[in-house]
Amino acid sequence: MTKLLGKSPQITHILRTLPMIAASDASVLIEGETGTGKELLAHAIYAESHRKDKPLIIINCAALQVEGIEVDLFGRCNADGEIEYRGRLLAADGGTVFLDEVDALPLAIQAKVLRFLEAGECQLQGSYKLHIADVRILAASSVDLQQAVAAGSFRSDLFYRLQVVPITLPPLRERSEDIRLLLRHYGQEFAGSNAVIRYTKETERCLLSYAWPGNVRELINFCQRMALLKPGKSLLPEDLGMEMLPETAASEHLYSLPPTGIKLAQIELDLINQALEMAAGNRSRAARLLGISRDTLLYRMQKYSL
């Protein structure tokens, strides 16, 4: 299992307080953008808790089928009141449940989850009897639950019951000091028996200035892709995707050829004339504006009889 890594102040604080959080049975609400490592943190809390020898049940609330969700979570009894199907919350007795994307729970189910959190009680379908389970709840959301409460899509009482211990994982763009560490760690992890990929200074600058919208998950996928496609190589900026290049670098490749085509010679002649005009006839300066040597400019001028 991949670990939560980092030396930035935000991550350092989380890692420092993690043992204290893990030792408790309090509910934990982990918020952060997609790909920031919410599930990794949940695994870390579970691994250091006194419940680590009991099951960890991971429930992706966004993937639950609306029809049958109550049975899936809590269970079902037969006509005699005997448990016919033990739902996932009941099956986690003594252990931990991680409710990922908890904001996706329907409002009607949120009320039942709240009761389960408050008293460990759940009423199974087909029975009037209350069943008890001792379960610790960890929850995560990639949306702002306070905004969801204000919008009426999430119960305020459930929100406050979940966030006994609130943790916010910062996006990678706000912890840029961790990027080198993460690139080095996952580069080594995915290298296997091959040499580890390396980065030129220009490439590293591109990666450090990139916004990483997919956060740590995107960085992990990038390292795995490069280890497969460029094993042991020294990566150049052109090995990166266009979206990873700084705007100035990317703009050098953004000239679009119109469907009707162009007259390249005419464009070259026009640019030379513009450069000479901007340089007031100074050929050395005009050459610098065009990014070519003075001798190359003189050759092109002779070519076009300038």
Image (spheres, helix red, strand yellow):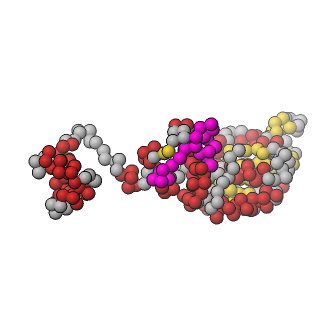
Looking at this view, is 33 or 204 the one in front?
204
Residue appearing at x 77%, y 57% in the figure: 27
Quadrant in the picture for residue 144: bottom right
Which quadrant of the figure has residue 129? top right
Instruction: Indicate the position of residue 260 as horizontal and vertical percent values.
Output: 23, 38
Image coordinates of residue 105 in percent, x first then y, are 67, 49
The residue lying at 74 percent from left, 52 percent from top is 44
Question: Residue 246 appears at what percent x and percent y?
Answer: 43, 54
Residue shown at the point (76%, 53%) measured from the top left = 45
Picture quarter containing residue 64? top right
Is 259 inside the magenta-drawn segment?
Answer: no
Residue shown at the point (70%, 60%) measured from the top left? 14
Q: Is residue 81 above or below residue 151?
A: above
Q: Is residue 278 visible?
A: no
Magenta range: 185-204
Q: Is residue 37 left or right of residue 133?
A: left
* Camera-side residue of 255 and 74: 255
Q: Is residue 169 above or below residue 86?
A: below
Total marks shown come to 0
